[in-house]
Amino acid sequence: MNFITDYILKNPPVLLGLISILGLIVQGKKIDEVIKGGLTAAFGMVILSKGVDMLVGSIVPINSAFQETLSSGAINEGLNDVSFTDTYGGSVGLSMFLGLALHLLIARFTRVKTIFLTGHMIWWFPFIFVAAGVEGGLSGISLIIFGAISSALYWSYMPWIMRKYVWAATEDESFLIGHPTGILSLISGFVASKVGDKSKSTEDINVPKSLSFFREISITGGIMMVIMYLVTGIITPNLVSEGENLVMVAIGNGLSFGAGLLIMLYGVRMLINQIIPAFQGISEKIIPNAIPAFDCPILFNYRPNAVIIGFIIAMIVSTVLIVISNIYSIFGVILVPLVITSFFECGAAAVIGEGQGGLRGSIIGTAVAAVVMVFIMGISVKFFSNTIQNWLLIFGGNDFSFFGPIARFLSTLLSNVF
């Protein structure tokens, strides 16, 4: 069980490579095509993951600098993923296995044909729901079953609920999105559909010929990251270590961010070109009409300008709201800027908004989603004050923060009953 958890389910390249191999075998492909297809899918996932790692590596120092400056030493080091996993890792693992079995049964025997393939999220959702169960007073078998059922329902239904928005943005009905951007993307898409204008797309933005390089997502993203580092470095001097030069640190991270975008998008294209045809074999033979749900960077290849616009809008709106909430102690907890969520979850929400309402829809939809992001973040951390509050402060503001409190409420009711 530990081997499958650590080396397959939590290892996306191996997981998707094996799925590709299975799909090609089911289709009756020759051995050379099976080997080539499996390795190509795995290579694509490795490339995508390395690109994402470079992006996160550029973002995390900004998060850490703000966290250190704003927390003033108030952070409880016990409330994080490592300490919680040390105590409840077994419950999370068992919930994951049981949840996956339920998830596949839902896909096989209901009209909801989602197959959730975002490897690391197969771990993090049981992690969240088990934490909610602990906060609500559950333990033992009841805690494991609660985490499993909650995870299976999320993996099955959230990508399915999002499907029309995703297909409108990508014009491709061969895949879904399996990522905690769900609630933010739904809000962005709904708002964009009401106030947007599809006649003008984010990808049709006209810029002077001398500034045409801004149409490249890697260049725009890199420049934006340099500016963000310079501004953050002025506000929080602890962003750079003693002896380092802020300008050069900013430039270095800007280059890494831009390169990470290029690598990630190349991996996305490589993965889609291989995994979708192979997955059709599984869909035809094992779970009829099944549709894979992938990580949100899959979306970025379709509306790259929307991603950058969404990131900028989300950072500005959410940071202003966080500063106000901290000054007036609105939530009773010191919040830190949600840089990671602003890029990945709100970047995806901007793509969904663009699909429903063009440039205007993308901007307004993402702005509204950013407001919701801060609100659910501030609310959710109060529900996890004994378990993973600090982890949520960095990685929340998304489906973790939306469904976590709901799960906490339900687990409290169940613990009172049982």
Image (cartoon, grey):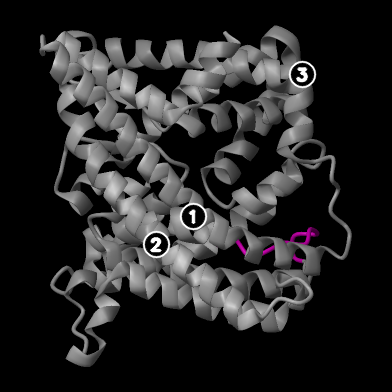
Residues at badges 2 and 1 in contact (C-beta under 8 Å)?
A: yes
Q: Which residues are magenta?
A: 330-339
Kind of residue at badge 1? Met
**Which residue lies under the disc numbered 2?**
259
Residue 315: image tag? none
Q: Quadrant location of residue 137?
A: top right
Q: Is residue 258 magenta?
A: no
Kind of residue at badge 2? Ala
Magenta span main SS: loop
In what quadrant of the picture does the N terminus appear? top right
**Which residue lies under the disc numbered 3?**
416
Residues at badges 2 and 3 in contact (C-beta under 8 Å)?
A: no
Give the image location of residue 207, x and y in percent: 22, 86
**Which residue lies under the disc numbered 1?**
54
Residue occupying the point 68% across, 52% down: 393
Secondary structure at numbered mark 2: helix
Give the image location of residue 218, x and y in percent: 34, 67
Q: Nearer the viewer, residue 186 or 28?
A: 28
Secondary structure at numbered mark 3: helix
Viewed as shown, does residue 102 lie left or right of 214?
right
How far apart are labels 2 and 3 at the CA level?
A: 52 Å
Sooner in the amino-acid sequence: mark 2 or mark 3: 2
Residue occupying the point 59% across, 82% down: 247
